[in-house]
Amino acid sequence: MKISEKIYTEIYKKAITVMDKAYAPYSKFKVGAAILDSSGNFHVGCNVENAAYPIGNCAEASAISAMIASDGKEIKVIAVTGYGELLCTPCGGCRQRIREFSALDIPIIVGNEVEIKKIYTLEELLPSSFGPENLK
Ligand code: THU
């Protein structure tokens, strides 16, 4: 799939829009995630915290759940946004969650409430990874 600059802007906007819907009363750190899947459909998610802290969901996990529930199969692009200047890169667990549903060269767009800050590949964020093919 050829990914244009327009798609980058579109997916990033979806991530910042859903970011404000996050339920983050404990950390006060709202995160948004948007996925473009291999069928050309978008899926979004935000972090959803819980008074029992460890069971909160990350934004990426929410977006992946939305993709799977809509019959999406493969992540082609994912954008993750958080407020502020420090890069809101996916946490370790979410890197592995993305790994389950994507190729290693997919773009992972990271931005804040204003603009895209950096674009990584999954391979850069999760080198020498373990994935589904290890179990075949
Ligand atoms: N968070 C995400 O949603 N995604 C990440 O990759 C990093 C962290 C959320 C989890 C928690 O609700 C808040 O940010 C602070 O850690």
Image (tube, rainbow, N blue to C red):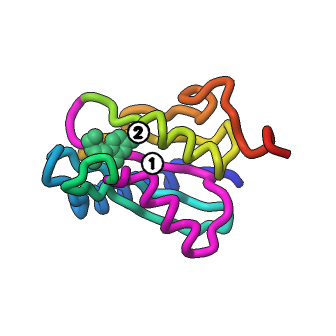
* Residue for point 19% across, 55% down: 51
Label 1 vs 2, first from the N-terminus: 1
Ligand 1 closer than 8 Å to label 2 CB: no
The question of residue 72 being in magenta is answered with yes
Q: In this orientation, does residue 46 appear?
A: yes
Chain part drawn in magenta: 56-85
Mark 1 lies on residue: 79
* Residue for point 33% across, 58% down: 46
Mark 2 lies on residue: 110
* Residue for point 70% across, 40% down: 131
| Residue extending furthest toward the right | 136
Give percent across and percent down for residue 54.
31, 47
| SS at circle 1 | strand
* Residue for point 24% across, 53% down: 52
Residue 17 or 21: which is nearer the viewer? 21
Dot 2 crowding, Cα within 10 Å, few <14, some 14–19, many 20+: many
Residue 2 or 101: which is nearer the viewer? 101
